[in-house]
Image: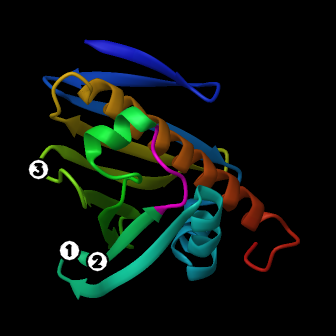
Amino acid sequence: MVFVQQVRGTTYPLVTLGVALEVHQTQTFEFSAQECWFLWISDEVQEEIAKAARITVEPIETLETPRGLTRRYRVVPHDELPPVAAKALGAPRFTYIQTDVIDERERLVSWSIRPDKMGDRIQASGKISLADTPTGGCERRIYSKISVAIPVIGRRIEKLVIENLAGSHERVAEVLRTWSAPDQGLA
């Protein structure tokens, strides 16, 4: 069964799998996947993404593993949740630990989050990959899976998570496009 959700003027397909939702997004850029990859993983661009997303990123650890570089960090949003979600979560902000496994060879990031509150009831994970297009640009393909097992308001929280994810991915795209401009040092 496929649903469609409109977020900030962009339509995203939602695929239901029992209680979990899958979100698929594709973003296109006018520069190569390799250029996009090096921009995206650079510390400078990551700092700009955090500013644009209005979050504080607190590094926990970075490890070299057989699966690739693994980064774990705490994410603390600057903005508070709507009152209903804050009450259900038992906290004013949706803070979480994010783990990214970075495969440079495949230009793939596999991510998952573990919320500080209700980590056993809220799950989100996904993959983000980059691929060259025939026109010389690239696509950033985003797959996310979200599951919220909270009676009555679970779907509302899923919607908030989806909106936050979609907005976050759009901000990443804006930062990448800005940093790829000729007047920036990385173009």
Q: Is residue 150 left or right of residue 143?
A: left
Cα separation between marks 3 and 2: 22 Å
Which residue appears farthest toward the right when viewing the image?
Answer: 183
Q: Is residue 92 visible?
A: yes
Q: Main secondary structure of the magenta part?
A: loop
The image shows residue 22, relative to residue 109, as above or below, that is above
Q: Which residues are magenta?
A: 77-82
Using a 10 Å C-alpha cutoff, classify the residue at mark 2 as few (fewer than 14 neighbours), some (14 to 19) or many (20 or more): some
Which residue has dot 2 on it?
Answer: 70
Say which of marks 3 and 2 sits in front: 3
Front residue of 39/117: it is 117
Please tell me which residue is depicted at 49% across the width and 50% down the height of the picture. 80
Q: Position of residue 162 (x, y in %)?
A: 41, 36
Which quadrant, please, contains the C terminus? bottom right
Q: Is residue 36 left or right of residue 127?
A: right
Please tell me which residue is depicted at 58% across the width and 57% down the height of the picture. 53
Q: Which mark is residue 187?
A: none
Which residue has dot 1 on it?
Answer: 67
Using a 10 Å C-alpha cutoff, classify the residue at mark 3 as few (fewer than 14 neighbours), some (14 to 19) or many (20 or more): few
Which residue has dot 3 on it?
Answer: 120
